[in-house]
């Protein structure tokens, strides 16, 4: 089975251009999986339900389940984007 390809991706953001909406609580829509991909640096991903945190880097992307509340926090200079899928992505 082929790995799914994203149907949409955000622009590449850095610590200065990362939108406020991504820094605050938000979630994906029903039937939408997200994968946060750090290109350079590190980014803290905070899940709210259940509460947990994961430090993302170029070797460790951050999966987001449909409807899963979360937010991100830059901790060092970084670049990242979010890929969106209509089925579970592969890391």
Image: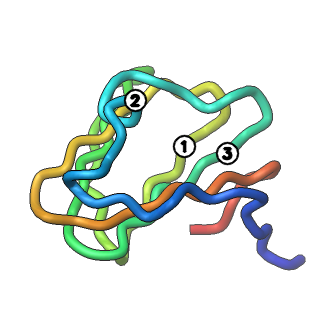
Asked if residue 42 lies left or right of residue 63, the reply is left
Residue 6: percent from left, percent from top: 73, 63
Q: Residue, x 32% and y 44% (percent of image)?
A: 45
Instruction: Compare residues 24 and 88 and report the one nearer the observer.
Output: 24
Residue 49: percent from left, percent from top: 44, 21
Label 3 neighbour load within 10 Å: few <14, some 14-19, many 20+: many
Q: Quadrant of residue 28?
A: top right
Residue sitting at the far front: 17
Question: Regarding mark 3 in the picture, which secondary structure is present there?
Answer: strand
Vertical side of 32 occupied by 2: above or below? below
The mark nearer the N terminus, 2 or 3, is: 2
Q: Residue, x 63% and y 25% (percent of image)?
A: 67
Q: Quadrant of residue 55?
A: bottom left
Return the residue at label 3: 33
Q: Which mark is residue 40?
A: none
The mark nearer the N terminus, 1 or 3, is: 3
Return the residue at label 2: 21
In this rendering, the label closer to the viewer, 2 or 3: 2
Instruction: Compare residues 41 and 12 and report the one nearer the observer.
Output: 12
Label 1 neighbour load within 10 Å: few <14, some 14-19, many 20+: many
Label 2 neighbour load within 10 Å: few <14, some 14-19, many 20+: few
Return the residue at label 1: 64
Q: Residue, x 67% and y 45% (percent of image)?
A: 33
The mark nearer the N terminus, 2 or 1, is: 2
Question: Regarding mark 2 in the picture, which secondary structure is present there?
Answer: helix
**Do the CB atoms of the residues marked 1 and 3 lie less than 8 Å apart?**
yes
């Amino acid at each position: 089975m082929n790995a799914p390809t994203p149907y949409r991706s955000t622009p590449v953001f850095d610590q200065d251009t990362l939108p406020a909406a991504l820094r605050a609580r938000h979630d994906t829509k029903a039937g939408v999986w997200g994968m946060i991909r750090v290109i350079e640096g590190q980014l803290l991903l905070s899940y709210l339900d259940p509460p947990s945190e994961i430090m993302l880097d170029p070797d460790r992307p951050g999966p987001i389940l449909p409807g899963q509340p979360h937010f991100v926090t830059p901790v060092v200079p970084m670049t990242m984007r979010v890929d969106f899928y209509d089925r579970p992505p592969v890391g």
